[in-house]
Amino acid sequence: MRQIHKRLLASAGFISVAAYTIFFAPRWFFFIFVEVFILLGLNEFLSLAEKKGVTIHRILTLTFGALVPFSVFFHSDSVILMLAMLAVLVMHFKPSLRDQALISTAVMVFGILYVAWFCSYLIKMRYLNHGGWWVFYTILLVKGGDAGAYFVGKNYGKIKLIEHISPNKSVEGAVGGFLTTVALSLLSFIYLPHVPFVHLLVLGILTGLLAQLGDLAESVMKRDAGVKDSGAVPGLGGILDILDSLILTIPFIYYYITIVLGEMI
């Protein structure tokens, strides 16, 4: 099977599983689904850091990464993150870790923030009014945009986007992905009829930009670590490769909903 077919099939499969988990599975199952993705993605992030020779306390980082999603029930994000930073700092009191204290602390804390905290907003979003549809909207726009970028780039891409970061990405693919995201957002009036059309346009434009920035950000990390994929999920690379374009968009859409649109939990 051609790679493009594998990519599109894998993206369609991911969106289908996500749709089932959002709309038909109980909320506790959705929570576990997101929790598992967070831990697998964080674990891959730590593996990238280890390839650079950074000393990582994997169990400690994953423990706090697992605790972050629970803050949605207790409104305790800041407490858990503060305890995580404190624990990581105290861990480096060991004489054997002194030479790695700065870089190791930064990487572990960043991993908890970047993967666990940002992705946990998906759980917060699920508890909003029309939360299921908003979660579906976020995943559909981002992964649909990914598929559009891949299809256009693979078939029509000629101009390199940022070759030193990701040599396979093209300007044509970026434009194709952006336009796909905007189109999917505008079409979302079908299941989000209460949202004014202008907000769907703004959300589509900003989500299209943030999704590609998130993708490029992870490409920078992978290139620095000297790997092509963060893991081995057929057709999609790794769990972090699935999450990369979602990581920046999830908290953005959550705050747009709660602050601009005024949706309440």
Image (cartoon, rainbow, N blue to C red):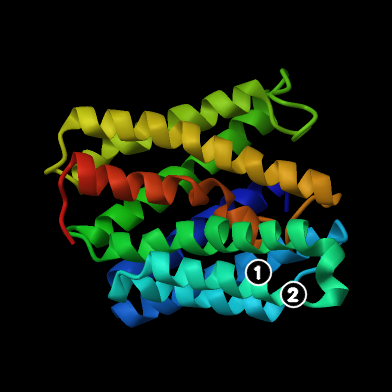
Q: Position of residue 55 (x, y in %)?
A: 81, 67
Left or right position of 153 against 48: left
Q: Count neighbours of disc 1 (C-alpha within 10 A) and say few if under 14, some if 14 to 19, many if 20 or more.
A: some
Q: Is residue 4 above or below residue 67?
A: above
Identify residue type, mark 1.
Leu
Residue marked by disc 2 = 93
Q: CA distance from mark 2 to mark 1?
A: 7 Å
Q: Is residue 265 above or below residue 28?
A: above
Q: Residue at x 48, y 67 (%)?
A: 82
Asked whether the residues under the numbered discs 2 and 1 touch, taking CB atoms below 8 Å apart as contact, a structural biologist would say yes
Residue 123 appears in which quarter of the rendering?
A: bottom left
Q: Is residue 172 above or below residue 230?
A: above
265 or 181: nearer the eye?
Answer: 265
Write down the quadrant of residue 46 in the picture: bottom right
- Residue at x 87%, y 75% (from the top left corner): 96
Q: Nearer the viewer, residue 75 or 184?
A: 75
**Percent position of residue 142, x then y:** 46, 45
Q: Position of residue 146 (x, y in %)?
A: 55, 42
Identify which amino acid the numbered label 2 is placed on.
Phe
- Give SS at disc 1: helix
Q: Quick one: 122 or 54, which is closer to the camera?
A: 54
According to the picture, the residue beneath numbered tag 1 turns out to be 89
Question: Is residue 234 shown to the viewer in this render?
Answer: no
Q: Is residue 265 left or right of residue 204?
A: left
Residue 136 numbered mark, or none:
none
Q: Quadrant of residue 94?
A: bottom right
In percent of the image, x 68 and y 33: which residue is there?
Answer: 154
Left/right placement of residue 115 relative to residue 153 reads left
Q: Label 2: how many residues lie within 10 Å, few (<14), some (14-19) or many (20+)?
A: few
For residue 203, above or below residue 10:
above
Q: Secondary structure at mark 2?
A: loop
